[in-house]
Amino acid sequence: MNGFKDFVLKGNVVDLAVAVVIATAFGKVVEAMVKIIMEIVGKIGGTPDFSNWTPGGLSIGAFLTVLISFLILAAVIYFFVVKPYTGAKARFFPDEPDAETVDPNTELLKEIRDSLRARPGL
């Protein structure tokens, strides 16, 4: 039982459960946004449903419908989630300069310091 208790309490099970719940809720929000955009596209150029299109007897229409939905979904996620998140992250949490990146002026000052220390009589 101790192993199970450690797994549940010390592992990332709670974090994972919260992530699944939030992802499920977020998925519903994105689906609703895609539905709205598909309706707008439908009002502009007709309903974007190619399910019955079968050129040469191949069921390409269903694939095109799903592909268009995917592209709209990807656009919604990028423009309404990724881009605002990236902007907010850059604004509120600016990148710290890398510790290994040395300013050329600092390097020059270190060389001058070392040179002055090496001079006799100082």
Image (cartoon, grey):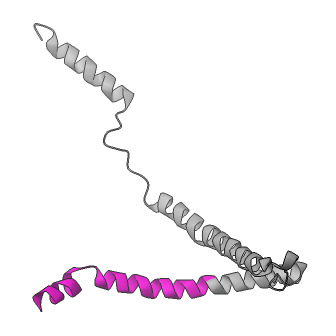
- Residue depicted at 87% across the width and 75% down the height: 56
Tell whether position 24 is magenta.
yes
Residue that protrudes farthest toward the top in the picture: 120
Residue 102 as seen in the image, left or right of residue 47: left
- Report the residue at 20% width, 19% height from top: 114
| Magenta-drawn stretch, dominant element (helix, strand or loop) | helix
| Residue 79 position in % (x across, y down) | 64, 68
Q: Quadrant of the C terminus?
A: top left
Picture coordinates of residue 34 (x, y %)?
Answer: 69, 81
Q: Could you tell me which residue is drawn at 20 percent across and 14 percent down? A: 116
Quarter of the figure with the N terminus: bottom left
**In this picture, residue 115 sits left or right of residue 58:** left
Magenta range is 1-30
Q: Residue 90: image x %, image y %? A: 49, 58
Q: Give the image quarter of residue 48.
A: bottom right
The residue sitting at the front extreme is 57
From the viewer's side, name the closer residue of 104 and 25: 25
Residue 105, by quadrant, is top left
Q: Which residue is most to the bottom?
A: 1
Residue situated in front as seen by the camera: 11 or 58: 58
Determine the residue positioned at 33% across, 81% down. 15
Q: Position of residue 95 (x, y in %)?
A: 42, 52
Q: Quadrant of residue 87?
A: bottom right
Q: Is residue 60 left or right of residue 30?
A: right
In this view, 13 is above or below 80: below
Q: Decide whether residue 106 is among the magenta residues.
A: no
